[in-house]
Amino acid sequence: MGGSPRTLLINPTITSRSSARFPLALLNLAAALDRNGHSQIIDGNVDRDLIGATLAAIESDRFDAIGVSVMGGPQIAPSIEVSRVIRERYPQLPIIWGGYFPTLYTDTALSAPYVDYAIRGQAEESLPELVAALARPGAPAIANIGSLSWKHDGSVVHNPNRRFSLGDSGIVLPYEKLGDPRRYLARTFLGERTAAHQAAIGCRFRCTFCGVNAMFGGMTALPTAKRLERDLSYLKYELGADSIQFFDHNFFDREVDMIPLLEVMAKLEMPWWCYARSDALLNLSESTWELVRKSRLRMAYVGAESPSGAMLKEIRKGTRPDQTLQVAELCRKNGVIPELSFMVAPPQNTLEETEHTFEFIRELKRINPASEIIVYIYTPLPESSKHEKDRGKHASMPLLDLHGEPVVFPSSPEEWTERRWVDYACHADAPWLTDELRRHIQDFVTVLRCRFPTVQDLRSPSWAKRGLSAMASWRYRRRQYDRPWELNLANRLVRLRMPQVSGL
Ligand code: B12
């Protein structure tokens, strides 16, 4: 080995080609790696033959390390597959896993023979240091690289966490590394060419259930207005994007800090979608709302989570149910669609919470019929996945399955690919759900989404959506959710879009 360090970055397939958006994690890492080295990106969402593309890249170039981006859920299986093949064919090539899965389940990731290193949290500094250390003896010792976990003498060593940073490379992301970046612009309800972008990093809030808190430990960093304008102008004027989906963990922060950013958005006038909180939106003054309207915010995704104040307190959400109701009304007045997500069937008060949530959703629909609703199953993170600042603190009740036995989380990446654990990671199922309740929730969701089809669905023709809505209306009115066989049948023909699975 020798020369400047070379890294192959892989985004294993997680979604369909048409739902593929900029692999922002790898673009940010590539920008950092290219400062003193070279990197190449393979995106399995676009390149459907992930293994073939990976082997071809390794055969035609020299790499010092492979970096794989891994999110829990459906991305684990292709991550294992590609890592295994590399290990078999090129046993000397170090394999590094990064992203949410190895951050939250570091020991589990490192228990696999095909994972040599895991970087926890942000990696713009740690990854270049690691690859440099692997490429040249004499580079900073592995033991000094922050946020790195590695194997030493048969055990796993966790280096201390690195401090949080905005990670601004000072340049526009190296989109050209993706071949033609325009193929990532998608037709959505926002526009003909929607681009995905992340402006701020992290989230100031410390909700116990959220992977983002576990990743960033309650830290956030906003971009400067200058940087936001530079990045969005590139997307608009160079790539031709006409609308933006912000992947920011939480877009609206304190009002004073938001005004300069909203001014940029108002200047560019690209319809946009973002994550937000009810309290932040309710705190905006009328003049700021005027900016928001001018900027053409179309939809704000708000984690409503629960209609119960006690539960919101327990998960440290920091908002109240009455704020959820108020934000639905406020959004209606301002022409913004609120996309409200809920977590039903928690491990305690499972049934009551679920029924209570369904009634609360009906109330929201009365206040603002345009509200979009996302229903997830509440699947908390294991204690060991929480951020080190939180571990062991707000001790929650032990999770028990249907038979009263403690829930034991998987101890290998392979186990995480089992259907029940993929569903757990996707907030689609939990070990304490009875078959009856699981079906009841599915049936409620079917009736709800047929009765109120999402505006995000561009594929289903409007006559079909109107027909389904009419078919579902009596069930919705009379709360006859169970066994909606006629809707399931009609749905099979129409296949309504599910934003929680594919994104916009
Ligand atoms: C885009 C996205 C998706 C897209 C994928 C992209 C696409 N369409 O092409 C889609 C819509 C498919 C998706 C799906 C899911 N997602 Co998602 N998704 C996101 C989102 C909004 C943005 C990710 C992103 O680009 N971030 C920007 C980059 C810059 O940050 P980053 O990814 O964190 O990367 C940094 C580090 O993680 C690290 N890193 C990342 N990769 C690598 C690789 C290496 C080698 C190294 C060293 C480091 C490293 O370094 C990066 C730079 O610092 C995040 C929330 C968020 N804002 O991050 C949720 C998020 C990651 N998703 C999440 C989840 C749970 C899912 C699902 C599995 C479940 C669900 N119901 O949402 C589903 C799967 C659905 C299904 N198929 O059934 C959670 C993960 C939390 C957790 N507990 O694991 C998040 C945090 C949302 C949340 N708050 O719950 N998702």
Image (cartoon, helix red, strand yellow):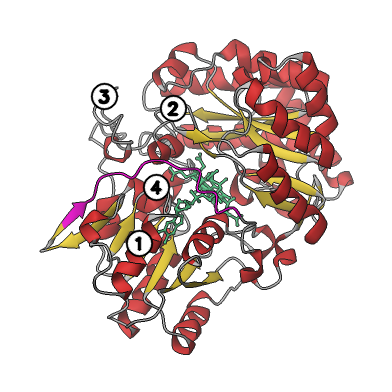
- Which of disc 3 and disc 4 is earlier in sequence? 4
Residue located beneath label 4 in the image? 121
Numbered tag placed on residue 314 in the rendering: none
Quadrant occupied by the N terminus: bottom left
Picture quadrant where residue 109 is located: bottom left
Label the magenta part by its dominant secondary structure: loop
- Which of disc 1 and disc 2 is earlier in sequence? 1
**Numbered range of the magenta stretch:** 156-170
Mark nearer the viewer, 2 or 1:
1
Q: Amino acid at mark 4?
A: Gly
Q: Amino acid at mark 3?
A: Lys
Q: Position of residue 411 (x, y in %)?
A: 25, 52
Q: Secondary structure at mark 4?
A: loop
Q: Is residue 457 left or right of residue 62?
A: right
Q: Depth check: 289 or 80 in front?
A: 289
Q: Depth check: 349 or 280 in front?
A: 280
Residue located beneath label 3 in the image? 393
Q: Position of residue 292 (x, y in %)?
A: 78, 28
Q: CA distance from mark 4 to mark 3?
A: 21 Å
* Residue 269 visible in image: no
Q: Position of residue 488 (x, y in %)?
A: 67, 45
- Which of disc 3 and disc 2 is earlier in sequence? 2
Q: Depth check: 138 or 414 in front?
A: 138
Name the residue furthest left. 153
- Which of disc 2 and disc 4 is earlier in sequence? 4
Residue located beneath label 2 in the image? 207
Residue located beneath label 1 in the image? 129
Q: Amino acid at mark 1?
A: Glu
Q: CA distance from mark 2 to mark 1?
A: 31 Å
Q: Residue at x 30, y 65 (%)?
A: 115
Q: CA distance from mark 2 to mark 3?
A: 13 Å
